[in-house]
Amino acid sequence: MQADYFRLAALVACGGVWVDADCVCAAPLVDLIHTAAEGIIPVIGNRLTNFFLASWEPGNPFLRACLELATECIERRIERGVYDITGPGVLNAVRLAIGAIPEDNPHLQLTWEPPYTPAPAKLDPAVREALLGLTRMHVLSLEPWLQPVEATYKDAPGHWLHWKGSIYVP
């Protein structure tokens, strides 16, 4: 949860590139970076994910809206998994709140109820424009640059996948 939250905060504050520790670069990222005008966000199926995120400028309105929702989830101690509280579920909740984007499946639905879903009319139009400005790439399209590695640290009892209590549900 801390890494999910930190990645959003860091990208909103500074811009840049985030790659999870369980990915290795198979080719220089500079070639990938030059393919996108404003940044990159990966897509699995029809859902946004966050193992790799890039925003060339600080303050991206879409990522800022995601950070605000993640903050709200934490402050309200929403009892859901990390995926929904600060992870990809937050990206997809904001994405649904701003309305469809061109390649969206009209049947895309969340598997959870966020603490609030801002009405599209209440969201700054810059949020939608910022999402449209990020190049959405299917994860398989990223394979020439990024490849997953076995993350043995996730098997350790201290990893959040094994935590119980507080905001984690057994």
Image (spheres, rainbow, N blue to C red):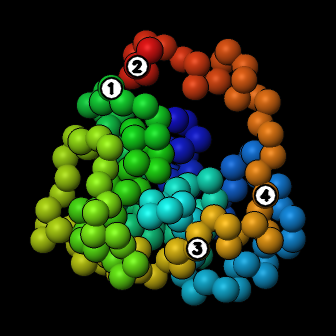
| Quarter containing the C terminus | top left
Q: Which residue is mark 4?
A: 147
Q: Would you say the residues marked 2 and 4 are in contact, meaning their CB atoms lie under 8 Å apart?
A: no
**Between disc 1 and disc 4, whose residue precedes?**
1
Label disc, if present, on residue 169 of the rendered structure:
2
**Residue 103 placed where, x, y %?**
40, 78
**Could you classify mark 1 by the number of other residues whose Cα lies within 10 Å: few (under 14), some (14-19), or many (20 or more)?**
some
Residue under label 3: 137
Estimate the x, y position of residue 150 in percent, counting from the top left: 80, 39
Residue placed under numbered mark 1 in the picture: 79
Give the residue type at disc 3. Answer: Met
**Which residue is painted at 76% across and 51% down in the image?**
148
* Amino acid bearing label 2: Val
Mark 2 and mark 1 in contact (Cβ < 8 Å)?
A: yes
51 versus 131 height, above or below? above
Real-space CA distance between mark 3 and mark 1, rounded to the nearest whole angstrom: 31 Å
The residue tagged with tag 4: helix, strand or loop? strand
